[in-house]
Amino acid sequence: MSSRRALALVLLIVAVGFIALIAAINFRRPAASPFAHAVLVFDVPDELQESQAPRWGLPFGAWRPDRPTVWDVVRAIRHAADDDRVEALILHVDGLDWGWAKVAEVREAVLHFRASGKPVYASMESGGEKEYLLATAAPRITAPPLAVLQLDGLTASALYLRGTFDKLDVRPNFAHVGQYKSAVEGYTRTDMSPPAREALQSLLDDEFAVLLDSLAAARGLTTDSVASLLDNGPYVAGQAMAVGLVDTLLHPADLDTMVVRMGRGTRRTETLWHYLNRLPMTDDGARVAMVAVEGEILPGQSRENPMGGRVLGEETVIAALRDAASRPGVKGIVLRIDSPGGSADASDRIWREVVRARRRKPVIVSMSDLAASGGYYVAAGADSIVAQPGTITGSIGVFGGKLNVLGLYRKLGLNVETVSRGRHAEMLSPFSDFTPDEQERFQQQMDAVYRTFVSRVATSRALDTAWVDSIGQGRVWSGRQAEDRQLVDAMGGFERAFAMIRARAGLAHDEPLAVEVYPRVERTLLQRMIGDLFDEGDDQTSVMATLRATPAWHAWADAALWPAGAALALMPYRLDIR
């Protein structure tokens, strides 16, 4: 046998052995089988996305296992509410790295399950206001004896890099439109401007008011009582029980055992992930497309950002919208948006496609945690917009610019010499500042983009241009504040959006819907099997998900990676209200 044939035989044996190993790993798992009486256990993940990871992105990204999305979770819990085999639901709540709108969405699904007459229990192992708000969907809350409930109020912070830039001799050259468009302040100031502080305080006040109302209603307290409890926090578990924030001290496993034994006959626990895997891909009923718009908006295909987070590729979203709009059986489109914005040009092109899709069938926007700046730009093209009270929205404004790094280079012993032809040839060079004339010209570019942004919103929403300008100016609003200013049509989540689709499509108000998710992320059988190798279990997040960058790293990466001179419809800072 020749050496070439021998090598081919060895490779074939290795490949067959590898496939056999993968198959054995998959087949060792218990087969899905019907169950008669079950307690559904939801180990709430610390991260929850609106869509599956894009096929293109980081190395080996396509090989990672799929994780349930917000829609998967909501669909499974609502389905279980009507499933006679499911008799109770237990939530195990720990630290959550979601926004307030996602918490509200999942909480509404749990409240729907509870309204079916089935008992709901929650175990809160740690966390603060977000975690506790989700736990209060259950009438009975437990905590381990040594748990600490970090219930002490809300904060929002903003990072400023100007002091570091000065030390490094990096000179920011930026322009913005909108007195509240404070994203640029992170690069140009060392502290918060009065307009930015006004907007942030207003947003925090509204989020805090919604929190107090929700907790008071859930625990049968007054809002003043809840405010007092938060002022006196945080609490160890015994203290939380003494003041009525939790009902019983139990370890999570003991809660599971107690609930299983409370029922009649033989009951067992079933994880929400296993239950979800038993459900059909779509339900029966009228077909509705759900197009996920998640991440920072950029040209090209959707992908994962090597610095962390998702990139929402303009081409991917436009293709998904065209696909959904062209399918005769699809009765309407729900555009699910979770985006802080990004490229103004890419946002404008997606907006155009939303408007085109709207001419063929109803398009309803359902806002998640963020629909700000470019995210709102995209939303404005739809028939109607639905938001949660805690959705961060608006920020109708733009900014752009560049960093002059020549001083930093010289500190490092480097130098750059440039020759050019043309008065403004070096306008976007990273080795020079704007001249006064260039600064004026660049400001005019930003003004033109802002006028277009305002015009798109005014035309799509049938609003007066002056009114949109007055509530724009780069200001960020809560969902509730945005509704008051006609930027949003209604409060709610998936179910409210589906109700609007039914009404506009002429369907009965109780017509079942079969929801098809776009963009379609398809992986080969081999990719899915290998993904299972990296799956650390139903209740674990991926290793890559734990490698999150710090806010300072994100800010530096944003400044370095955004193209010089690009007009950005991006929300101010990376707002995280905790």
Image: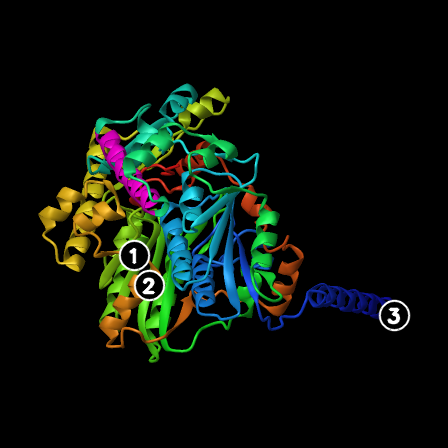
Q: CA distance from mark 3 to mark 1?
A: 69 Å
Residue 478 pos. (x, y %)? 27, 44
Precedes in sequence: disc 3 or disc 1: 3
- Residue 564 visible here: yes
Between label 3 and label 1, give the one nearer the viewer: 1
Q: Nearer the viewer, residue 255 or 361?
A: 255
Q: Quadrant of residue 359?
A: bottom left
Amino acid type indicated by mark 3: Ser
- Mark 3 sits on what residue? 2
Residue 260 pos. (x, y %)? 59, 58
Q: Badge 3: few (under 14), some or many (20 or more) residues near its Cα, within 10 Å?
A: few
Q: CA distance from mark 2 to mark 1?
A: 7 Å
State the mark number for residue 492: 1
Left/right of residue 537 with respect to residue 386 in the rendered view: right
State the mark number for residue 495: 2
Magenta stretch bounds: 195-217
Report the residue that reaches farthest toward the bottom: 328
Magenta region's main secondary structure? helix
Residue drawn at x 44%, y 47% as measured from the top left: 135
Residue drawn at x 22%, y 48% as measured from the top left: 482
Q: Quadrant of the C terminus?
A: top left
